[in-house]
Image: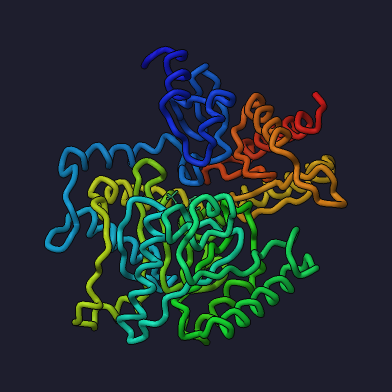
Amino acid sequence: MRETNFLTENNARHVWHPMAHPADMLANLPRIIKAASGVEITDIDGKTVLDGVGGLWNVNLGYSCDPIKQAIRDQLEELPYYSAFRGTTNPPLIELSYELAEWFKEDGLSRSFFTSGGSDSVETCLRLARQYHKVNGQPERTKFVALKKGYHGTHFGGASVNGNANNRRNYEPLLPGVSHLAAPYGYRNPFGTDDPAEIAAAIGRQFEDEIAFQGADTIAAFIMEPVLGAGGIMVPHETFMPLMRAICDKNGILLIADEVITAFGRTGAWTGSRLWGTRPDLMSTAKAITNGYYPFGAVMIADKIAEAFEANKNTVGAIGHGYTYSGHPVGAAAALATLKETKRLNVAANAGARGNELLAGLNWLKEKHELIGDVRGKGLMCALELVTDRATKTGAPKDMVQRLQDAAYDAGVMVRTSGSNVIISPPLVITTADVDRILAALETGLTAAAGGK
Ligand code: PMP
């Protein structure tokens, strides 16, 4: 490996980072992470910290999962690549489809379409939703409805259903025919209530109103994350997703569950849809499907949708969509090994138990630290929303949030920031001692952010 100076200088000179300002690169040098083991990462200066971000909500099993690494090595030797376009397939891809049908049986999803990551999976869902209606004799159903604060990746379709201005405004015009409902966000919403059940019902009314305005027969699908992630962790009331499902059903609209974060146990349930007792028509997955070790994703398809395509012998049923790496044999082998380990370690149960401890600890921190305006979480996806004034709910400025992150890192834990939110999404295999470590580092960070020592 080259020396540190070479790496820092050339990162600043040549690398453009996702979700960062290119002009910022010299002023705010990124940390160079050179190694990882267990639930810890090590930077180029040799400092080792607990990864409270879990990679990017994807390294659910930590960094030392040998069966996945071995499966990748073995598959590279056996068949490093072949395409799954019409006419060819490969053994790990078939086996993975079989295992995924088992995994998602309770969600009513039996067919899989493979992708290279979350944005690809979302895009695939949006395209298949439109095509389904054409197959089904309703070609005028082309529009999408989504939630503000939702995050669905950065392809043009995904960006169009995204509910965050930062991911949208410099890339407009986006896809026409997309409307957004309010987020299920208790701390800030237009409804004048913080009661989650009331908020759920109010968004339901907004949805029905939007359907009446647009015309039900023009809408292809509604897309939502079962727990909103990148937008700042919004946990809807338990009635919310079933209500949205019922409104979709009443109006012939498909429900797309974007489970890129939630599909493999992060919320404490095996899928977010199951958490809320709901079955989607299409589900996007990626991230933890390979524990972050290989770029890969899968769209899961409900029987109703699959059967409509399979029964249609016209060209409208032919899938004009797919990626060079759809069904990559190495990704499929990585996913197979990941599913096996995910199940063996029963990480959903641990995510639920450790998540409760973490949430209780965050609420305890809120009692002590004025800077915390709101605490949210489900399983191991949690957030602190920082404010400079609890009465006015004024969001904490960037430098303050950055101070928290830096001090928490110095104290031994990496956390992520997004606007005024601090996001905590560690690997699902953490222990109670790890939860304590996260809370202690956050406490140090909060004190530093508030200007103390
Ligand atoms: N959907 C959701 C819910 C996500 O959280 C993400 C990524 N954070 C994506 C889609 C996009 O995934 P990717 O970054 O792998 O393209």
Number of labels in the image equals 0
Look at the image and name its color scheme.
rainbow
Relative placement, left or right, of 200 versus 59 is right
Across and down, in percent, residue 288 comes to 43, 49
User: Closest to the observer: 153 or 88?
Assistant: 153
> Which of the two residues, 204 or 407, is positioned nearer the viewer here?
204
Give the residue at x 54% y 67%: 146
Q: Residue at x 77, y 68 (%)?
A: 195
Between 170 and 326, the residue placed more toward the observer is: 170
Q: Which residue occupies the extreme right position in the image?
A: 391
Query: Measuring 47% from the left and 68% from the top, which residue is drawn there?
Result: 176
User: On the image, which quarter does residue 202 sit in?
Assistant: bottom right
As drawn, is 453 to the left or to the right of 212? right
Where, quadrant-wise, is the N terminus in this rendering?
Answer: top left
**Between residues 234 and 151, which one lies in front from this camera angle?**
151
Name which quarter of the figure residue 71 lies in.
Answer: top left
For this orientation, the residue located farthest to the left is 87
- Residue 325 horizontal/vertical position (percent): 26, 50
Residue lying at 23% horizontally and 49% vertically, measured from the top left: 329
How far from the left and from the top, in percent, is residue 300?
37, 66
The image quadrant that residue 105 belongs to is bottom left
Q: Specify whether residue 344 is in view.
A: no
Any part of residue 368 in sight: yes
> Is 236 situated left or right of 328 in this image?
right
State the quadrant of the C terminus.
Answer: top right
**Residue 366: x percent and y percent?**
80, 45
308 above or below 335?
A: below
